[in-house]
Image: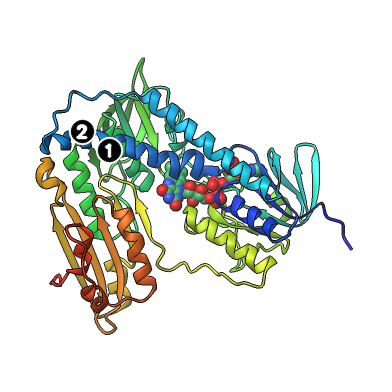
Amino acid sequence: MAHYDFDLFVIGAGSGGVRAARMASGLGVKVAIAENRYLGGTCVNVGCVPKKLFVYASHFREDFQAAQGFGWVVNKPHFEWAHLLSQKNQEIARLQGIYEGLLTNSGVTLIEGQASLLDAHTVRVGEQAYRCERILIATGGWPSIPDFPGKEYVVSSNEMFVLEKLPDRILIAGGGYIAVEFAGIMHGLGVKTTLCYRGDKLLRGFDEDVRDFVAQEMRKKGIDILFNTQIKVIEKTDSRFIATTDQGQHLEADLVLYATGRSPNSVGLGLEVLGVELDAKGAIKVNESYQTNIPSLYALGDVTDRMNLTPVATAEAMALVNSLYSDQRTPVDYDNIPTAVFSQPCIGTVGLTEAVARNRYEDIDSYKSVFTPMKHTLSGFGEKTLMKMIVRRSTDRVLGIHMVGADASEIIQGMAVAIRAGATKAVFDSTIGIHPTAAEEFVTMRKRVE
Ligand SMILES: Cc1cc2nc3c(=O)[nH]c(=O)nc-3n(C[C@H](O)[C@H](O)[C@H](O)COP(=O)(O)OP(=O)(O)OC[C@H]3O[C@@H](n4cnc5c(N)ncnc54)[C@H](O)[C@@H]3O)c2cc1C
């Protein structure tokens, strides 16, 4: 019998890798995990967690203003970026400690360093080589910035979490969720924010009403959004950057953020030598069991570039470990995965967009409601909320639910359960609302959009 140092060697201690390692170890598997940067991966260090903390921080500006409509006398609030960074760093250090504890307490061997593959059963970290029965690649993704003159002056989302000081003006390139979220964060923290996107709407893949509505609300708050505009060149003067666009504008900023996409972290692992199949973007190709074309190698999470979300990476990890080491089967259902964009206002969405639903079925009804949420009747902001429901007439099944407004990310989680359970419109209609809330709108939508 072949001798192995480990039954399972996981490369990358991010959302997917940590979950797989812990679970496998809990099932009696001998597991090692290698991490070259930070425990917890993107989500904990430069993704979901610090981003959401920044969203909270940035929203206070509006909250202080809104409070005045409710009778509060607010002296001029003052924001300190350094304090937020230090608080955020402390929280992340705490989470990293928790991750380390979870791994070591569950018996996983934690190896610090850059891992690469020597062959289909051998991982090298530094000078050490480890023989392993199976290897799981969970190395995530990395910001990708296109080549253009002035590329060296821009930052990615990674640097946004460690900026020494806040700029007075920021130019953000991109129209995906990271660009949109940082636009809200920066604007909320008092930075003059311009979003520049080559497409004609933000957030490709989202419902068209959501795309239009969120851009409209962001503009109302004061974010400058330039559509159909691409930066051609960035020049640096003493203290600022000037971006020239294909529309002939010269946009001045003190910081330029490129949030134009992420690439799978598959370079430098030795995959080419082993002949591991990658797609055109460099994502590792896997079958429905997360196995690559080399039978002892598996991959999941962002490095496979499917649905790049933390709960998807952890669900894939559980599915893989269960299928390899237990008699449980917990396959991931990629339909109806709810997502949120922590824009301001926030987006929550689950299921089909209206366009996809109409493309797939002939009998689609759409219900839509746009209203001023109660808080903003007194806040003086005029911020609106959008709620939308997509229903198939012949089955009465609710196929999609979309919301832009405060707490959309919280509200949509429950809606996702209803959609997965196959709830019909009649079930929604017979559900008693919680009053007064925005969410009750979802059980009182009676008028179809003609
Ligand atoms: C700004 C931002 C905001 C986001 N917000 C959200 C959100 O709100 N909700 C959500 O669900 N998702 C969000 N995401 C996406 C989420 O962070 C990822 O989907 C998730 O982290 C993917 O997990 P993973 O395990 O595949 O990879 P990762 O979490 O990226 O972990 C990969 C790990 O592998 C390590 N590694 C890489 N190569 C090697 C090597 N050769 N040797 C050793 N270690 C290696 C890396 O250092 C990293 O720690 C966000 C991402 C970003 C960038």
Instruction: Specify whether 107 is left or right of 304.
Output: right
In the image, farthest residue toward the top = 238
**Quadrant where the image shows the N terminus:** bottom right
Is residue 324 positioned above or below 124 on the image? below
Instruction: Specify whether 290 is left or right of 416.
Output: right
Instruction: Specify whether 200 is left or right of 148.
Output: left
Residue holding disc 1: 59
Identity of the amino acid at label 1? His
Question: Residue 140's spot in the image, x, y percent?
Answer: 56, 48
Query: In what element is the residue under mark 1?
Result: helix
**Pointer 1 or 2: first along the chain:** 1
Residue at left offset 53%, top offset 40%: 95
Distance between the alpha carbons at the discs numbered 1 and 2: 9 Å
Instruction: Specify whether 213 is left or right of 117.
Output: left
Residue at left offset 56%, top offset 69%: 330
Near-viewer residue (311 or 75): 75
Residue at left offset 40%, top offset 67%: 336
- Asked if residue 280 shows in the view, the reply is no
Near-viewer residue (69 or 191): 69
Identity of the amino acid at label 2? Phe
Residue holding disc 2: 64
Question: Residue 183's spot in the image, x, y percent?
Answer: 31, 38
